């Protein structure tokens, strides 16, 4: 259950993979609920009826929320240890739908081809449309369909890792489900959350969704090539973003025209180098 909106995403999850005619392989996640307690690392949700009044219900909900986040944090720490062991630089890309996140990923992967070994985990509720686009770049990709779930969690990412040769990766990019609320609460073990905001959205998004813009220490302001055609104040948007996260690293980019992308690539290269150095130092 998502602690933000209540959607059921961290139940007893199973990934059932299948292959499409074009060769794309992906999996779907589904959940079970059980009426008993046990201690494995799967995320089981247990529903209970309470008749002791609102206070008891609130306490029970707080306990469930605490348990969910604590379990996710443990699994995220395990993911982080795996990434550190293999020297993989990992980003969790978050945004609202339509920000151009997948287009940004496609351009990044194409431009970095031959320079870094990349892989992508794609999160979506129902389709594999974005995974098909990423697969066309030649980069390994693993699809996670969350059904009614609104975000990826550390457990889902851990199982997706089983499908990559981690010894052959420099960068892992996780494209989260399009949602500026719930993904903010779930650590996946990544080095950075990077939020993608486009100039076709409201410039006040950082203030409307402060938890996400506070959790993300990187922000990509995308589609800047459209600025002559839309009413959007970059200065005002950045001022709002700085108000929520003063130390955020911000890039003004266009995945279509390529404007600003070199600075983004330089930052990625620095992240890979820093991760490799950390491995050498042990």
Image: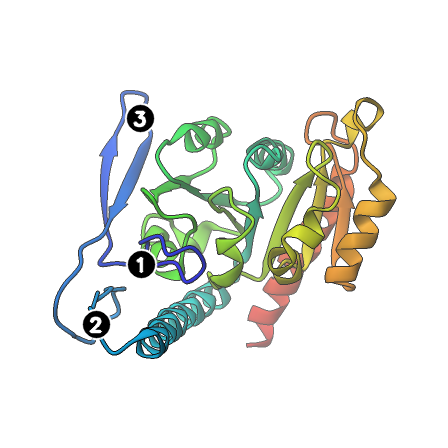
The label on residue 23 is 3
Q: Which of marks 3 and 2 is nearer the N terminus?
A: 3
List the residue tagged with mark 2. 40
Q: Residues within 10 Å of mark 1 (few under 14, many from 20)?
A: many
Q: Where is residue 213 in the image (x, y as percent from the top left)?
A: 66, 56
- Residue sitting nearer the eye, 82 or 115: 82
Q: How far apart are marks 3 and 2 (CA)?
A: 34 Å
List the residue tagged with mark 1. 10
Taking the spot 65% from the left edge, 58% from the top edge, the residue there is 210
* Quadrant showing the C terminus: bottom right
Q: Which of marks 1 and 2 is in front?
A: 1
At mark 2, the secondary structure is: loop
Residue 41 falls in which quadrant of the image? bottom left
At mark 3, the secondary structure is: loop
Q: Which of marks 1 and 3 is nearer the N terminus?
A: 1
Is 234 left, or right, of 195 in this rendering?
right
- Residue sitting nearer the eye, 169 or 55: 55
Q: Can residue 235 be seen in this view?
A: yes
Q: Where is residue 129 in the image (x, y as percent from the top left)?
A: 42, 28
- Residue sitting nearer the eye, 49 or 249: 49
Residue 42 falls in which quadrant of the image? bottom left
Taking the spot 50% from the left edge, 67% from the top edge, the residue there is 84
Is 112 left, or right, of 85 in this rendering?
right
User: As displayed, is residue 249 above or below residue 51?
Assistant: above
Q: Distance between the residues labelled 1 and 3?
A: 29 Å
């Amino acid at each position: 259950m998502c602690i933000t909106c209540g959607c059921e995403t961290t139940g007893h999850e199973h990934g059932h993979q299948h292959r499409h005619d074009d060769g794309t392989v992906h999996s779907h996640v589904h959940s079970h609920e059980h009426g008993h307690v046990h201690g494995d690392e799967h995320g089981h949700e247990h529903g209970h009826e309470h008749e002791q009044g609102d206070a008891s219900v609130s306490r029970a909900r707080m306990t469930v929320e605490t348990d969910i986040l604590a379990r996710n944090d443990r699994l995220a720490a395990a993911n982080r240890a795996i990434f550190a062991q293999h020297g993989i630089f990992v980003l969790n890309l978050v945004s609202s739908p339509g920000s151009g996140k997948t287009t940004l990923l496609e351009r990044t992967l194409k431009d970095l081809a031959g320079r870094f070994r990349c892989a992508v985990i794609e999160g979506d509720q129902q389709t594999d449309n974005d995974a098909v686009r990423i697969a066309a770049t030649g980069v390994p990709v693993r699809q996670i369909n969350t059904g009614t779930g609104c975000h990826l969690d550390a457990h889902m990412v851990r199982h997706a890792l089983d499908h990559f040769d981690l010894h052959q990766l420099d960068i892992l990019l996780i494209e989260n489900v399009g949602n500026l609320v719930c993904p903010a609460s779930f650590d996946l073990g990544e080095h950075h959350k990077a939020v993608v905001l486009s100039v076709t959205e409201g410039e006040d998004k950082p203030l409307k969704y402060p938890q996400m813009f506070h959790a993300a220490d990187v922000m990509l302001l995308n589609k800047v090539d459209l600025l002559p055609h839309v009413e959007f104040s970059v200065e005002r948007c950045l001022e709002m973003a700085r108000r929520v996260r003063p130390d955020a690293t911000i890039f003004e980019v266009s995945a279509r025209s390529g404007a600003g992308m070199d600075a983004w690539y330089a930052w990625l290269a620095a992240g890979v180098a820093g991760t490799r150095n950390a491995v050498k130092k042990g």
